[in-house]
Amino acid sequence: MITIETLCVEVRGLARDDVERWIERSWVRPHGGSGRYEFGDIDVARVRLILELREELRVNEEALPVVLSLLDQLYEERRRLRRVRDLLDQAGPEQRAALLRLIEDARE
């Protein structure tokens, strides 16, 4: 966990005001309260993503909630697919074949 001060030093081009505004808008959800924020790895990654979207991809702040929501949905689906893959890996050969047939049938 790192403080907001450390975050602003570690992430080039990041301003404290931006981070505080992103927290107010619930785009970033660190632990702790105002003045005592603690950022974990996932928070730092989220801050870097928002900064990249804004600075490099020129996504304006009005569009950011939509973009972040879509990315969150995509990441959640990827987690689900990894879980399905893990379950398939754990299944026996007959179970795996039956499950794969069901998946193929559902695609049609």
Image (cartoon, rainbow, N blue to C red):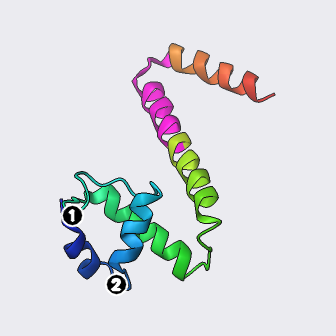
> If you read the primary sequence from the N terminus, does the residue marked by circle 2 or circle 1 appear first?
2
Mark 2 residue type:
Arg
Across and down, in percent, residue 28 comes to 40, 58
State left or right for residue 16 relative to residue 82: left
State left or right for residue 51 relative to residue 63: left
**Residue of label 1:** 35
Residue, x 20% and y 74% (percent of image)?
A: 6
**Residue of label 2:** 12
Q: Nearer the viewer, mark 2 or mark 1?
A: 1
State left or right for residue 49 relative to residue 30: right
Q: Is residue 39 above or below residue 94?
A: below
Mark 1 residue type:
Gly
Residue, x 48% and y 68% (percent of image)?
A: 50
Q: Secondary structure at mark 2?
A: loop
Across and down, in percent, residue 70 comes to 61, 52
Task: Please tell me in which quadrant of the rendered image residue 101 appears.
Answer: top right
Between 27 and 67, the one lying in front of the other is 27
